Image (cartoon, grey):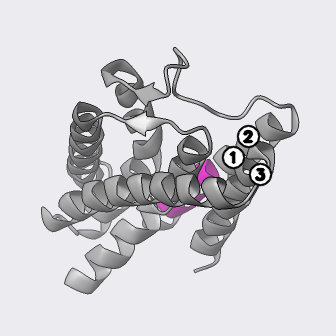
Amino acid sequence: MLFNCILLALSVSIDSIGIGITYGIKNTQIAKISNFILFAISFCTTCGSIFLGHYIAVILSPAFATFLGSSFLIILGLYSIYKSLNNTPINFDADHSNVIDKKEAILLGLALSIDSFCVGIGCGIIGIDDLLLPILVASFQLLFLNCGNFVAKKIIQRIDISENILSIFAGIILIFVGILRIIF
């Protein structure tokens, strides 16, 4: 059960690396309170979706939930590439302050939780109702977001890479993860 929870948490959190890389490229900081907000939204969303999954088990199959979550990843990746090619990458730093504040963290948290919501429903449907899964999902999302941010900042200091190229790369990663989740 622990191994399954870790794999599920990793799979729904991996897209946070791409978002973190995008912020690192722009030298955008994530405020401490924003990290707490992101953790809380992810945790609550996953808990709520597992609970909801128990009640809609007769309507929605686990395969459909996985397909839906994977589709969201692929669509987000395609959208990220599209926005990058048009010089308007996805950015939750609405006020362009280079700091993700509380309001922006709520929007980012909701966007990052779409996939965990779908997977949580699937887990609830198949009977996974361990509190460990929401804790791992929230922790991994926060870890990957901040690691992606940190690594991108370090790369940008050493190598001159276009923001659009890295945003396109992040979109490709999202699409790749989405396709892998559909296949496996």
- Distance CA(mark 2)–CA(mark 1): 6 Å
Count neighbours of disc 2 (C-alpha within 10 A) and say few if under 14, some if 14 to 19, many if 20 or more.
some
Q: Name the residue under label 2.
A: 79
Instruction: Tell me whether circle 3 and circle 2 mark residues in contact (CB < 8 Å).
Output: no
Q: Please state which amino acid type lies under the numbered disc 2.
A: Tyr
| Label annotation for residue 168 | 3
| Residue on which disc 1 sits | 75
- Look at label 1 and name its amino acid: Ile
Q: Are marks 2 and 1 in contact (CB under 8 Å)?
A: yes
> Would you identify the image quadrant in which residue 135 lies?
bottom left
Give amino acid for label 3: Ile
Res. 106 image quadrant? top left
| Residue 60, position as x, y percentages in the image | 43, 54
Question: Is 30 above or below relative to 159?
Answer: above
Q: Position of residue 115 (x, y in %)?
A: 46, 51
- Quarter placement of the N terminus: bottom left
Q: Check whether the beta carbons of the residues at disc 1 and disc 3 lie within 8 A of each other.
A: no
Of marks 1 and 3, which one's residue comes earlier in the chain?
Answer: 1
Q: Nearer the viewer, residue 72 or 83?
A: 83
Which is nearer the eye, 101 or 25?
A: 25
Helix, strand or loop at mark 3: helix
* Number of numbered markers: 3
Q: Give the side of residue 32 with respect to residue 70, left or right.
A: left
